Amino acid sequence: MSRLAILQDYVAKGYVVKDDTIPGLAKKLGIDPKGLEETVVKFRKYAKEGKDPEFGRKTFKCKLDQPPYYGVAVEPSVHATLGGIAINAKSQALDKNGNVIPGLYAVGQVSNSELGRHGVNIFVPPSFAKIAVKDILSK
């Protein structure tokens, strides 16, 4: 499936909105049309100059100079926590000096495991939970 076909599918499903004008797009997204228009004008200027003094952007693959325009309503959410309680290979929680905190275990995304940092954290909760339980039962 082409990238355009995927985008059209998302528009059809309502995930993405489309309009031929920036103010029209803003209205569909429920945001201030004047504010979005001002932001796009500024972005176009930066794209023409090839640099963005506000955010340091240097690459402008899209200049936002030809309709149609697409937008997505985004709201804050938590996808994953990349950080948390340091653990060892037995899921034992560690203090700030790297020493085991007796009787305290951390599993899943509450833990700051190496696996979770590399995009494979789907396996972290069950794997470390099993490791922690085995260690607890072995005592």
Image (cartoon, grey):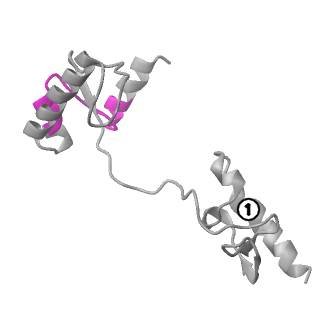
Task: Residue at 58%, 60% (x, y): give it.
Answer: 83
Residue type, mark 1 in image: Pro
For disc 1, the marked residue is: 126
What range is drawn magenta here? 10-26
- Closer-to-camera residue (110/12): 110
Task: Residue at 30%, 38% (x, y): give it.
Answer: 72
Task: Residue at 66%, 45% (x, y): give it.
Answer: 118
Dividing the picture into quadrants, the one containing residue 96 is bottom right
Dividing the picture into quadrants, the one containing residue 44 is top left
Q: Check the image and name the residue furthest to the right.
A: 138
How far across and down, in percent of the image, does residue 1 sit? 50, 18
Task: Residue at 70%, 54% (x, y): give it.
Answer: 114
Q: Is residue 18 magenta?
A: yes
- Closer-to-camera residue (20/37): 37
Residue 108 relative to residue 55: left or right: right
Residue 37 relative to residue 84: left or right: left
Judging from the image, what secondary structure is the residue with disc 1 in? helix
Q: Is residue 108 magenta?
A: no
Asked whether residue 79 is in view, the answer is yes
Q: Is residue 10 above or below residue 67?
A: below
